[in-house]
Image (tube, rainbow, N blue to C red):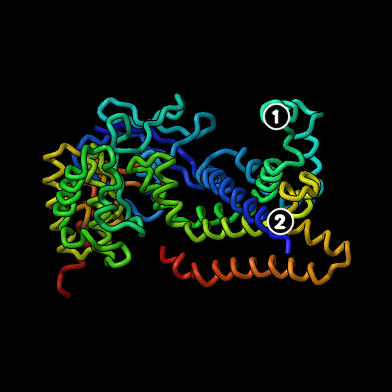
Amino acid sequence: MLDLAIDVRRGAFHLQVDCRFASEWTVIFGPSGAGKSTLLRLLAGLDTPSRKGPNRARVAFDDQLLTDSPLGLTLKPGPRKWERKTSFVTQQSALFPHLTVAANVAYGLPWLGGDADREQAVEAALELVGASSLIARRPGDLSGGEAQRVALARALAPLPRLLLLDEPFSALDGAASDALIARLQIWLKEHSVQTILATHDATDALATAAEVVQLREGRLVAQGPAIEVLAAERERLTLRLKPL
Amino acid sequence: MDWQALALTLKLATITTAILLAGAVPLAALIVLGRGRWLAAVEALAALPLVLPPTVLGFFLLVLLGPRTALGRGITSLLGHPLAFSFSGLVVGSVIYSVPFAVQPLVAGFAAVEPALVDAARLLGASPVRLVSTLLVPLARRSLLVAAVLSFLHTMGEFGVVLMLGGDIPGATRSLSIVLYNQVENFDYAAANRTAAILLGLSVVALAFIYLGGSPRAGRRA
């Protein structure tokens, strides 16, 4: 369960969100510029308001404080026990270009016992996302969709407790994306990983039947089951599919 | 040809470059990755030798490392001799004088690494040391090469700081640029031509190494 109270200004943009994400899979839905990425960066610990100043952020996960800017507290990003244990996958896969796929996925695992354990974790993560055949390749030789699969494997390998996804399937075609999401949801449930997916695509939000949080211009405008929050979007999509 | 001066100059440039790279990598990483207004002051301080006349820097160092200051007296009692007019003093002066030539290419190279890659490494728990050694340095290796070559060449041709801080002691502080100055002062233009040709040749070879050896395309692909 994730509790957040955020009041942050970035230039002219003002993000003000005070809510609880209780569902295992939450979709943050909103148009570009609604504040989805800013919110995810705050949750990931990549953006932390300073202790002094007008900006405030408080994030608690299962009663553990991840960020409390008025107290000057921020749990450092990272996969170890005493760290944030939060993974974040963005649309831009951000693979390290000088490392192989295997080394990219293993990057977050230096704390894992021996080489054999690391190799096993890397292979398992790549298999989960359907990228086992890419293990020896370099990021420069991957397609956009392959790179996104590898980025997802790299995020999952350290077994995070919170997974943040910022339109990470944009380069995959519809069927591949649906199959990957379905496989991912089973794995995340098995490993008790709470997931937050940010998207501007209503089909992504509707496909997962998740709890949806709708953001607009930095404000939370609706929260609830996808079928309720996105009723208007669903109707719009259905009308588009109707033959003329 | 003054082979002793050539050997001393090469030794000075090698030691200075090694010290500079060891210090400039963490300093450049701090400037690029750090937060806080004080970093602008650090960056400005690192650029100061670019605009400071070498004789002014040499004079300040001469006073600072001499017997008039507590630091100078402390170093003298520690080493058994003053740093001024010694090879060690020359190394200190050369390092300070060439700081911008090592730091600035590295700052530019590190800053060119995509922020998304730095974020990804931080999310995967990379410590600052690991972030620099496994991500910034490999991706900015061309900048590292430029920093090394510029530091080496700048030290090779240094004159003002060397003269002020080291004087002209054969085998201890007499570098090639001092030899060249002496040769011109003695109207020995033939010898001066040979000395100048060596400095020019080394510079051309080193720059060819940067522009031909480490091609920009290879750097960008990294």
x then y, percent, for residue A149:
23, 57
Q: Is residue B169 left or right of residue B218?
A: right
- Secondary structure under tag 2 reads helix
Q: Earlier in the sequence, mark 1 or mark 2?
A: 2
In the image shown, does A50 or A118 lie closer to the viewer? Answer: A118
In the image shown, does B56 or B181 lie closer to the viewer? Answer: B181
User: Chain under label 1?
Assistant: B
**Residue drawn 17% across and 75% down?**
A244
Q: Residues within 10 Å of mark 2 (few under 14, many from 20)?
A: many
Q: Which mark is residue B19?
A: none
Quarter containing the N terminus of chain B? bottom right
Amino acid, disc 1: Gly
x then y, percent, for residue A55:
49, 35
| The furthest residue to the bottom | A244
User: Chain under label 2?
Assistant: B
x then y, percent, for residue B221:
41, 66
**Residue drawn 67% across and 45% down?**
B91
Q: Which mark is residue B80?
A: 1
Q: Which mark is residue B5?
A: 2
In the image shown, does B92 or B53 lie closer to the viewer? Answer: B92
**Residue drawn 46% across and 43% down?**
A14
Vertical relation: B126 (above or below) A74:
below
Q: Is residue B196 left or right of residue A81?
A: right
Amino acid, disc 2: Ala
Vertical relation: B203 (above or below) A155:
below
In the image shown, does A64 or B16 lie closer to the viewer? Answer: B16
x then y, percent, for residue B143:
53, 58
Residue B183, by quadrant, is bottom right
- Whether residue A211 is visible, yes or no, is no
**Residue drawn 15% across and 58% down?**
A130
Q: Is residue B162 left or right of residue B144?
A: right
